[in-house]
Amino acid sequence: MKRARSKRPARARPAAARTAAPPLSVVILAAGQGKRMHSDLPKVLQPLAGRPLLAHVIATARALAPAGIQVVYGHGGEKVRAALASEPVSWVLQEPQLGTGHAVQQVASQLDDAHRVLILYGDVPLIRPGTLQQLLELAGARSLALLSARLDDPSGYGRIVRDARGHVRRIVEHRDAKAPRELALRECNTGVMALPAAPLKSWLARLRNDNTQREYYLTDVIALAVAQRFAVRALIAPSADEVLGINDKAQLAAAETALRRRTVGELLQAGATVIDPERLDVRGRVRLGRDVVLDVNVVLEGDVVLGDRVRIGAGCIVRDSEIGADTQVQPFCSIDQARIGSACRIGPFARIRPDTTLGTEAHIGNFVEVKNSQLGPRSKANHLTYLGDASVGADVNVGAGTITCNYDGANKSRTLIEDGAFIGSGSMLVAPVRVGAGATIGAGSTISQDAPAGELTVARSRQVTVRGWQRPKKRGA
Ligand code: UD1
Ligand code: CA
């Protein structure tokens, strides 16, 4: 969609030519160690917006609907596979790791000669599918396409060497570049390339490791292609952010910032009011209704759905939850894996834990914790309460300081509070227990047997007054 709006006139290609494009195989290189991370976690599992780097790359690859995705893994081997076990990819082990060319050699036998191949890096996570689509359109039976970037600081990167007419001739790695003229080149290799499978395989077979790192460089296929009169086309990435390679924690933090800006920008485009775009974190996917307001230092994680006119106060963390229209979440709440109805009032300082469901107009106030519980419409727990493993009906009022004693040290049990019940402040509800519809519990009760519907139940020792009692005095006074 975006490309249609770009200034470059879109060259119309007949639909038939599009459908005739050969099937696509994506190869993701993810075997490198990532020494510069100084971490026990393999580099491609380092989290970006709450998900492993490699998961971002796989998601981008999937957006292209390829025939297959092959991930070359090695360092941190089984950890990497286990962390991403549910991804629809094939895993290919590279052991030992002798360079990017050697990595692609490991999958060569599994690549169909008739396919196009797109090579992605597990440590370059922010590329947009649209950019890759453009790259793929530049690759053909006799041409390959590589993604380059103009960088202010090209150190560490391979440089794109062009001839006098501007044609790409080869790539020279930073460490192998001797001529100052080469080191001064600003156009860098991002590592991403698209090319036909059959010639790729023949070039891979001819790679040599006669370079400073004694590695088999994938980048050397460019010179081999040029020698065979293949066209080599370089697409300059629309932004340096997209092709940021992540080798250390500083680059990881820079990617986090870039991705946050991108996702917050999308929320703004969708109509959200964001009080300070620099102080909103989105680590996942957010779906929004109209006129949603997000105050400062809000963190949205995983899958979050916010209905029309939802307001999230400062300092809240909302993770994998759905919040209904017109609900207000006041500052400093934590909401995790919950479904919150419409027109509810939450917080400030409320903690809503997994498997909680709140009905319309429910209120959960300050210092209230709710876990694995359902509250019906208009029910309230406004102060200092723990509701765990509880089923609460409609129009229930839970007084301050009430606790469901759901755990006996070995097992969890449920508390049932039926419609219209009133639980006096400071009550202990010792589960399993049931409070009938319309029942009233006297304040300070410890309820360990069912309380009948419609009646007042009080369970506490009777108040006594000891006449003439004197406070103890300090000895020797
Ligand atoms: C590579 C490119 C360089 C480019 C840069 C962009 C080569 C020779 N150089 O250099 O031109 O500018 O990326 O970031 O390709 N990997 C394996 N197996 C290996 C070695 C690497 O799977 O044996 C994977 C790594 O996990 C990583 C990617 O390949 O995802 C790139 O490897 P890295 O060592 O970071 O290459 P660079 O030296 O950065
Ligand atoms: Ca790298």
Image (cartoon, rainbow, N blue to C red):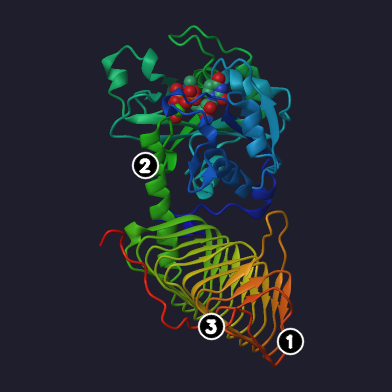
Task: Where is residue 420? Give x, y as percent.
Answer: 64, 89
Question: Between residues 291 and 242, which one lies in front from this camera angle?
Answer: 291
Disc 2 vs disc 3: which is toward the camera?
Answer: 3
Task: Where is residue 351? Give x, y as percent.
Answer: 51, 65
Tell me the number on the disc at residue 100: none
Find residue 377 and report its image quarter: bottom right
Q: Earlier in the sequence, mark 1 or mark 2?
A: 2
Q: Which residue is mark 2?
A: 254
Q: Is residue 444 above or below residue 318?
A: below
Q: Amino acid at mark 1?
A: Pro
Dot 1, how many residues are within 10 Å of its Cα: few (below 14), some (14-19), or many (20+)?
some
Dot 2, how many residues are within 10 Å of its Cα: few (below 14), some (14-19), or many (20+)?
some
Q: Amino acid at mark 3?
A: Gln
Give me the residue at 73% from left, 69% from top.
Answer: 432
Q: What's the CA distance linking mark 2 and mark 3?
A: 64 Å
Q: Amino acid at mark 2?
A: Ala
Q: Is residue 427 left or right of residue 125?
A: right
Task: Where is residue 375? Give x, y as percent.
Answer: 63, 77
Question: Which quarter is ligand 2 in?
Answer: top left
Task: Where is residue 470? Give x, y as percent.
Answer: 38, 75
Give me the residue at 54% from left, 14% from top.
Answer: 216
Q: Earlier in the sequence, mark 1 or mark 3?
A: 1
Find residue 142 and report its image quarter: top right
Q: Is residue 294 above or below residue 219?
A: below
Q: Residue furthest top?
A: 210
Q: Which residue is mark 3?
A: 463
Question: Between residues 91 and 373, which one lies in front from this camera angle?
Answer: 373
Dot 3, how many residues are within 10 Å of its Cα: few (below 14), some (14-19), or many (20+)?
few
Disc 1 vs disc 2: which is toward the camera?
Answer: 1
Q: Residue furthest bottom?
A: 454
Question: Between residues 270 and 464, which one lies in front from this camera angle?
Answer: 464
